[in-house]
Every structure is written in structure tokens, then in C-alpha cells.
Image (tube, rainbow, N blue to C red):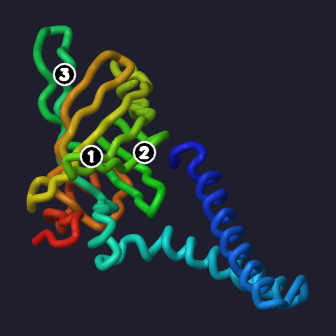
Amino acid sequence: MAEPGAELMEGLKIRVGIGIAALVGLALALLAGQGFSQTPLRIYSIAGTVAALVFALWERFIWKWKPVRYFTGVPLIAGTWRGELVSSYVRPDGSNVPPIPTVIYVSQSASKWTVTLFTGESKSISEHAKLIPDPDGRWRLSWQYVNTPRPGVRDRSERHKGAAEVYIGSQPGEGLEGAYFTDRRTDGELRFPEWSSVRYSSADSALAADGFNHASPFVGEK
């Protein structure tokens, strides 16, 4: 699910935009000496409709256009990322867990992000997700999640919560790379060098698929 309150905030932004557009239209009408006739009301209605349409188009489409992202610098990371999870968990016999093939699917709009992570044994969905620009020019995707293991492995892996964060590479082949930790006091590393625009329903289907390549999240990358 998206970050709590995100829909309310987006609705508030739209209403504020409509209000500003309406006030501007009303002020112009009054300055033109038209008073409170039907003309300002029509301007109010038209301005509100235009503002709502612009906000909706920005949220879904305009923000991702290359000319726009050239100025905003926002990376486009929507799609399926394939890589591995390296856990710090130590088995009872003292051995380490080998790297786990892992897939994440990122849904992205101008103000909302959702991250779904798949492995062969579990699935996690973000409760909060945010794309953050750092002062050094890098971008990172940060999210909190609830992980639900498959029924067949719950005798050794229970449902749990955690948080993860990955940096978005600016060079070809760097992909997403970062770390995670859980409320079970385990942590680990995440690496996702491969990307596809296709949305997959499971780790098995994504891991077996062809067509993955290196993404170019930033405008101007080769």
C-alpha cells in the first residue's frame, strides 16, 4: 500500500491548487470591474477544472517525461528489479545463508511509491515508501514493509516487519544497492543490477524470464 496519508495529501494539494486558481480568476474579474456577476463564477469553475486536470496529468504522466526530469532530476525506477538478498542470519549449525535470488517491483507516480519484494519463500509489501534526494546528488528509495512467508516455511520463518533502503546507481549496470533490517534482529544487503518494465506475479516467473537488462533511471544516462 502507499504511504499512509499520501492520498489525503494529494487530495489536499489538488484542492489548494483549485482554490489558488479560483482566487486568481476571481481577483482578475474584480479588477476588470465585473463584480460578483456570473463571469467570475464561470472563471472559478473553469480554473478549478483546469487545475484538477493539470494535477492529475502531472501525477500520472507529465513528471516522467524526459524534458521534465531533465530539470527535476527525479529518477524513473518503476518496473521489476532482479538480484539477490544477502542475509546476516546464522543457522543453528553455525553456517551462513547463501545469497537468496530476489525480485522487487516498484510502482511509481509523482508522489507515491510502492515496493513489493519477492523471494522463493516470502513476499513483502511496503507500508511506507519514499524517494529521497541526498545533498551529495544521489537518490535513495526507502521503505518499511511487512513480510509474509509462505505457509510451508512458517515453522522456521514467521511474519515480521522491517525496513529497507537502496541507492539508485547513476552509472550503467549499477542498478539498486542497499541494505535492510528486520524486527527479528537480522539484517543484510540488497543488490538489484537487472531491470525489466514487465510486472511479474512471483519470484519464480521473474527469475526465469528473459528480457532483463540494465536500467537507465536518470535522464542523460547511456
- Tell me which residue sits at (25%, 46%) in the image: 135
Kind of element beneath mark 3? loop
> Which is nearer the N-term, disc 1 or disc 3?
3
Q: Position of residue 58 (x, y in %)?
A: 49, 72
Image location of residue 23, percent across then percent down: 73, 73
Q: Please identify, in this view, whether the residue under mark 2 or under mark 3 is nearer the observer.
A: 2
Q: Which label number is shown at residue 39?
A: none
On screen, residue 83 versus residue 110, left or right, reads: left
User: In the figure, is residue 11 to the left or right of 213?
Assistant: right
Mark 1: few/some/many CA within 10 Å (<14, 14-19, 20+) = few
Three-letter amino acid code at disc 1?
Answer: Asp
**The C terminus lies in which quarter of the figure?**
bottom left
Q: Nearer the viewer, residue 181 or 152?
A: 181
Foreground mark, 1 or 2, reads: 1
**Upstream in sequence: badge 2 or badge 3:** 3
Where is mark 1, residue-wise? 134
Numbered disc in front, either 1 or 3: 1
- Amino acid at dot 2: Ala
Query: How many marks overall?
Result: 3
> What is the secondary structure assignment of the residue under circle 2?
strand
Q: Look at mark 3 in the image and give the residue it sits on.
A: 88
Q: Which residue is mark 2?
A: 129
Kindly indicate the quadrant of the structure image that contains residue 196: bottom left
Q: Amino acid type of disc 3?
A: Ser
Asked which quadrant contains residue 154, the reply is top left
Outermost residue toward the right? 37
Q: Name which residue lies at 60% across and 52% down.
A: 9
